[in-house]
Image (cartoon, helix red, strand yellow):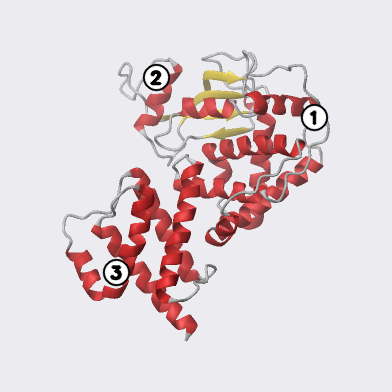
Amino acid sequence: MKILRVFNNNVVLASRVRPAGASYAQGNSAGAAAAAGIAGIPNATGAAGAVNPAVEHVVVTGRGVGFGAHQGDEVDESKISQIFVPADGRDPDHAGEMMAFVPYDTMRLVTEALTAAVKTTGASAKLPEKLTLVTALADHVAQAQLRADRGETIQYPLEAEVASLYPDEHALGRELLRELNERLAAGDRTAGDKASNRRSAADGRRTANGGGEQKGERGGVDKQLPAEEATALALHLVNAGFATGDLSYTYQMTGVIQQMLDVIGAEWSVGLRQASISVARFITHVRYLFVRLARGEQLDHASDAVSTQIAQAFPQHDRLARKVARVAELRFDQTLTEDEIAYLTLHIARLADTERNEHD
């Protein structure tokens, strides 16, 4: 791997041959090359300025991996801790900059804790490889440590909703918190590293080479993160699935999902069991609906014959689906297409059948 840019002592942008079977997004590599201020990598025909789809740009972390390094140098593989491949369409250069603003030791702490939590809960093994997720979690943990040091506790809104609407992410968030606290209690970092972490988290400033000590920081034992932080960690995990990069959007979606379920429950005069498989399926559908809304990619076929047939087959559920759709439309300032309403109708119909059987 060759270095394209040194962000600080512990984070660099590098190019490498794309592994067999890996996907290729033109905007990814081209954007990184432009942002790094380097010429395009020649393609297979040797055309000047072209980008080679066989090469990918990655963010490499590791203690000292960028120390004394320059553009064009080979990456010292003995110093590599982790290699992150930005998701297709994301600018690797920007992603590397974001990661460089998070204390390296906090990043390492979160990566190790997340990897262990994933193994314990059986969650996707790819989560610790998601650059934006790890960066967001590490940034949050760094701030949470500062609050813990000051004796501050945050009561996160929608705590009950997060636990019921996203049980898998909530379980992983709790296990991640346990793994973090276990490592903090074991004194996983040196006093000097802690000082550097707290300094970076407090003011976001960096020295010219991204490392270096500053005066005025204290050492000491890291305090345990409070149980309330599990909710915030879970929301970051949920946010990773939405791919919006905006945690406030995830908060908004959580509230909307709860409102939708309340509308359905009020219509049927029953309390929906949010732990049931049928409700979980409905929530999953709504989450993907929100992803489509965020991307401006609603389902919208040229013909409305299918949606019309569904409305005629399930008139009561169609009326309820339109009430539910109105909740989303008001909150997101978008009008749902007839196709989206038709799919909501089908999911509500299936939910009704399941709830009817469970209450008989």
What percent of the width, then of the height, locates residue 74?
56, 19
Residue placed under numbered mark 2 in the picture: 34
Residue placed under numbered mark 3 in the picture: 319
Query: Which residue type does callout 2 highlight?
Result: Ala
Residue placed under numbered mark 1 in the picture: 190
Q: Is residue 318 left or right of residue 240?
A: left
Marks 1 and 2: in contact by CB < 8 Å? Answer: no
Where is residue 22, by image quadrant?
top left
Marks 3 and 2: in contact by CB < 8 Å? Answer: no
Q: Earlier in the sequence, mark 2 or mark 1?
A: 2
Residue 1 visible, this angle: no
Q: CA distance from mark 3 to mark 1?
A: 61 Å
Q: Nearer the viewer, mark 3 or mark 1?
A: 3
Residue 330, compared with residue 29, is above or below; it is: below
Q: Secondary structure at mark 2?
A: helix
Within-10-Å neighbours for mark 1: few <14, some 14–19, many 20+: few
Query: Which residue type does callout 1 highlight?
Result: Thr
Q: Residue at x 47, y 68 (%)?
A: 279
Q: Earlier in the sequence, mark 3 or mark 1?
A: 1
Query: Which residue type does callout 3 highlight?
Result: Arg
Residue 127, compared with residue 159, is above or below; it is: above
